[in-house]
Image (tube, rainbow, N blue to C red):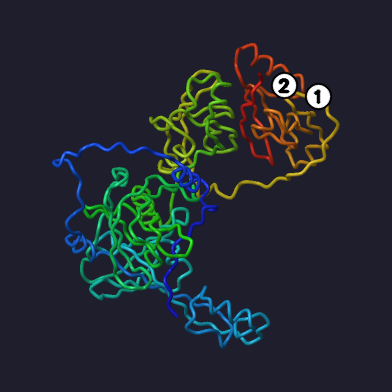
C-alpha cells in the first residue's frame, strides 16, 4: 500500500503566535490610496517559468519510503490510513475493529515525499517526517533513474533530514540561496510530488517572512504556491534557481492547499545540513541560562533606557555560570552583535561554534560588563531539567504587600513545594484577584526570591524594596519569582 507522506497539518490552536498574527491581519482595516503608476516602473509577472523549470527539475527527486508495520490479518487492503472506510469498518466490527482476535501479520507500507540534490556526489535534502522510521528509502529522478538512499542524519527540531545516494556519474544538483534577501511579494516556485502525481510545479509569491509555528528554531517563509501532501521535503525556488526554502507544512481545514504553505528558510536549513554532513547530527551552541524578554515595565523598574536585550532569570551550572553570569543580568550583546530579544539570542547561540569562547556583554547594576563564555553543546545538555511539585498548603499570613499575603519559607513549605533546602524567599499564600500583582501574573504558591534585584527573606524586606522604588520615582518594582521551581522576573506596579 502506498500513501503520500503527509505534510505537517496546522490548526490555529497549535500555532498561537501565527494564529494571532493572522487574526490581527484579518481584523486590520486599511485604506488604499490610488495613484498613477509609471509604466516604466510597473511590475509584471514573468512571461514563463519554463526555463527555470527546465534548469532545476533534474535535481528534484521523488522519495519512496518503505516501513514494516503489523496489523491484524485480513485487514483492509486498498484503504489508506485515515480513509472514511477505515472508520466505517472499525465502527461495525470488521477486520480492524475492536475485539478482533485475528493473528497479526507484518506487511510493508510505502509512503511518498519529495527532496532535492545539493551536490554532484549525491547528498539529498528532505523533511525528517518523510523518512522517519523508514526501513528502506528509494530515490527517483525525473528522468526515471532510481537509486537506493541511506540516511546520513536528521534534525527533528527543524524537520530536516540528509540522505546520500551512490551514482556512477555526477548528479545534477541545486544550491541554497540567501533566504534573508527574499521580500514579501517576490515570486517563488515549488516543486515536488504532490498527492503522488509525480513531478509537479506550482508558483506563487512570498506571502510573509519569519513565521513561527512550534519550534525553537523556526523561521518559515509563508507562500501561496500550491503545496499538498507529497510536497514535503521539496524545494522552494527563487526566480534565479536558488533553493530558499524546504516545503514542510500547510495550514488547512481539509488537508489540501488553501494557499497557506510554509517552507523552512534556507539560511536555517543550510547550517543544519552542513552539521549533518560533517557530524551526522546537529551541534548547537549552549549558553546555559534561563531567559525572558525585557518588557517596558521591567525596563522602567531597572532604569534601562529601552526595553531591549534579554533578562537572565536563572544561571544553573554550565558555561554562563562558569563565566560569572548572574541572575538579573540583562544580555545586550552576543559575539559583537546587539541582542534584540530571546528568540534572537537563542538562534545566534545555536549557530555559534561549540567549544569556542564568545564575548557576552551584560547590564548589571546599571553598568556594562563583558564576560567571556566558552559555549557548550546543547544536545549534550538537554534533558537535564528536573521536575517539581505544583501544589502547596498555605500557612497563616505573615504580612501583606501589593495585594499579596506573604509568608517566609519554612522547612515544611520547602519540603511540600519540593524546593531545595537553600531556597529562601516569600511564599504568596493568597492574592487579591483585583490587584496589579495578579494582573501581572503572580499567583498563590509563587515564591518571591528577589525584589529590586536584592534577596527578600521576610515581608519587611519586600516593603523596603517597594518603598525604595516609590521614593526613586519608579513606577514598578522588579520581582524574581519561582513557580514549580522555574524562575521568572515580573515587574509589578507600586503606585
Instruction: Give the vertical position of 61 relative to 416 (above or below).
Output: below
Residue depicted at x 55% and y 32%: 312
Specify the farthest residue to the right: 396
> Residue tagged by mark 1?
399
Give the image location of residue 436, x and y in percent.
67, 28
Q: Nearer the viewer, residue 325 or 488?
A: 488
**Above or below, 124 relative to 321:** below
The reply, left or right, for residue 146 in relation to residue 211 is left
> Which residue is label 2 attached to?
462
User: Helix, strand, or loop for circle 1?
Assistant: strand
- CA gap, disc 2 to disc 1? 10 Å
* Residue at the spot 29% in from the left edge and 62% down from the top edge: 202
Q: Observer-nearest residue: 231 or 217?
A: 231
Residue at figure coordinates x 45%, y 57% from the top left: 251
Residue at the outermost top position: 471
Pick the front one: 357 or 22: 22
Vertical relation: 452 (above or below) 339: above
- Image coordinates of residue 75 in percent, x first then y, are 55, 85
List the single residue furthest toward the left.
Answer: 40
Q: Which mark is residue 49?
A: none
Residue at 75 percent across and 42 percent down: it is 418
The picture places residue 279, in percent across and down from the top left corner, at 40, 55
- Would you identify the image quadrant in which residue 237 lies? bottom left
Q: Nearer the viewer, residue 363 or 101?
A: 101
Report whether 408 appears left or right of 350: right
Q: Looking at the image, do the residues carrying marks 2 and 1 touch, with CB atoms under 8 Å apart?
A: yes
Image quadrant in which you'd find residue 38 = top left
- Left or right: residue 110 versus residue 314 is left
Disc 1 residue crowd, few under 14, some 14–19, many 20+, Cα 10 Å: some
Amino acid at each position: 500500500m502506498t500513501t503520500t507522506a503527509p505534510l505537517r497539518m496546522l490548526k490555529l490552536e497549535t500555532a498561537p503566535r501565527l494564529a494571532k498574527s493572522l487574526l490581527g491581519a484579518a481584523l486590520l482595516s486599511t485604506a488604499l490610496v490610488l495613484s498613477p503608476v509609471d509604466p516604466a516602473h510597473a511590475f509584471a509577472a514573468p512571461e514563463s517559468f519554463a526555463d527555470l523549470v527546465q534548469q532545476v527539475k533534474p535535481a528534484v527527486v521523488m522519495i519512496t519510503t518503505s516501513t514494516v508495520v503489523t496489523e491484524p490479518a485480513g485487514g483492509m487492503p486498498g484503504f489508506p490510513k485515515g480513509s472514511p472506510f477505515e472508520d466505517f469498518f472499525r465502527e461495525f466490527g470488521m477486520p480492524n475493529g475492536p475485539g478482533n482476535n485475528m493473528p497479526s501479520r507484518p506487511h510493508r507500507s510505502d509512503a511518498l515525499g519529495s527532496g532535492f540534490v545539493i551536490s554532484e556526489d549525491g547528498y539529498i535534502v528532505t523533511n525528517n517526517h518523510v523518512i522517519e522510521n523508514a526501513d528502506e528509502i528509494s530515490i527517483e529522478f525525473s528522468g526515471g533513474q532510481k537509486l537506493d538512499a541511506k540516511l546520513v542524519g536528521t534534525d527533528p527540531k527543524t524537520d530536516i533530514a540528509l540522505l546520500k545516494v551512490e551514482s556512477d556519474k555526477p548528479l545534477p544538483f541545486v544550491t541554497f540561496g540567501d533566504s534573508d534577501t527574499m521580500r514579501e511579494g517576490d515570486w517563488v516556485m515549488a516543486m515536488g510530488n504532490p498527492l503522488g502525481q509525480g513531478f509537479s510545479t506550482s508558483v506563487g509569491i512570498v506571502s510573509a517572512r519569519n513565521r513561527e509555528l512550534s519550534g525553537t528554531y523556526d523561521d518559515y517563509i509563508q507562500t501561496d504556491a500550491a503545496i499538498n501532501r507529497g510536497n514535503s521535503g521539496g524545494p522552494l525556488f527563487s526566480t534565479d534557481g536558488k533553493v530558499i526554502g524546504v516545503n514542510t507544512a500547510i495550514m488547512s481545514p481539509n488537508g489540501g492547499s488553501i494557499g497557506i504553505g510554509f517552507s523552512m528558510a534556507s539560511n536555517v536549513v543550510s547550517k543544519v545540513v552542513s552539521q549533518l554532513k560533517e557530524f551526522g547530527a546537529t551541534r548547537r551552541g549552549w549558553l546555559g541560562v534561563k531567559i525572558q524578554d525585557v518588557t517596558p515595565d521591567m525596563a522602567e523598574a531597572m532604569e534601562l533606557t529601552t526595553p531591549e536585550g534579554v533578562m537572565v532569570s536563572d544561571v544553573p551550572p554550565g558555561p554562563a555560570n562558569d563565566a560569572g553570569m548572574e541572575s538579573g543580568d540583562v544580555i545586550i550583546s552576543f559575539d559583537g552583535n546587539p541582542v534584540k530579544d530571546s528568540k534572537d539570542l537563542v538562534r545566534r547561540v545555536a549557530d555559534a561554534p561549540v567549544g569556542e569562547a564568545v564575548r557576552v556583554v551584560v547590564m548589571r547594576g546599571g553598568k556594562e560588563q563583558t564576560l567571556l563564555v566558552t559555549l557548550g553543546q546543547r544536545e549534550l545538555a538537554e534533558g537535564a531539567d528536573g521536575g517539581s511539585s505544583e501544589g502547596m498548603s498555605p500557612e497563616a499570613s505573615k504580612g501583606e504587600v501589593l495585594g499579596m499575603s506573604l509568608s517566609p519559607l519554612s522547612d515544611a513549605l520547602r519540603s511540600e513545594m519540593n524546593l531545595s533546602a537553600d531556597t529562601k524567599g516569600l511564599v504568596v499564600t493568597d492574592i487579591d484577584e483585583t490587584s496589579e500583582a495578579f494582573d501581572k501574573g503572580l499567583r498563590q504558591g509563587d515564591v518571591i526570591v528577589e525584589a529590586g534585584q536584592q534577596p527578600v527573606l521576610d515581608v519587611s524586606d519586600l516593603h523596603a524594596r517597594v518603598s525604595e522604588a516609590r521614593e526613586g520615582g519608579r513606577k514598578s518594582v522588579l520581582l524574581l519569582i519561582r513557580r514549580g521551581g522555574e524562575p521568572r522576573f515580573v515587574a509589578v506596579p507600586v503606585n
